[in-house]
Amino acid sequence: MCKWGTTVERALTISARKSHTGKAFTKIIAIDACIAPIVDALNNANIETEESCCGHGLCTGYIALMDGRILAICNSKPEWDQLRDHWLDTH
């Protein structure tokens, strides 16, 4: 887990088809340092990410993909078990 507010900057390219202007552009974004390697690996594999948060020790982290899926980032097996059990109880 990173210290809260510890981020790294990355260049994010928005394709023309996903841009509100119809033109591709690049912007600099901040990513929580502790999950930046995962975000980088996904993007390098052409799995586009939209947003992410490590959870800052307050909640489960996540990485939202451009296709609508969301990846949970759990720091431990007990955290995953609790998240899974909550999801199963509510669905």
Image: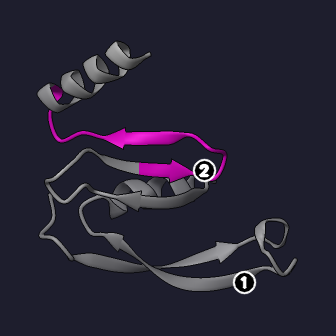
At numbered mark 1, what does the secondary structure look like: helix, strand or loop?
A: strand
Q: What residue do we see at 32% from left, 14% from top?
A: 89
At numbered mark 2, what does the secondary structure look like: helix, strand or loop?
A: loop
Q: What residue do we see at 50% from left, 51% from top?
A: 64
* Quarter of the figure that contains the N terminus: bottom left
Q: Is residue 21 magenta?
A: no
Residue numbers of the magenta segment:
63-77
In the rendered image, residue 38, in percent from the top left (x then y), is placed at 38, 53
Q: CA distance from mark 2 to mark 1?
A: 18 Å
In the rendered image, residue 45, in percent from the top left (x then y), is placed at 58, 51
Number of disc labels:
2
Q: Earlier in the sequence, mark 2 or mark 1?
A: 1
Q: Residues within 10 Å of mark 1 (few under 14, many from 20)?
A: few
- Residue tagged by mark 2? 47
Residue kind at label 2, given as amino acid type: Ile
- Residue tagged by mark 1? 25
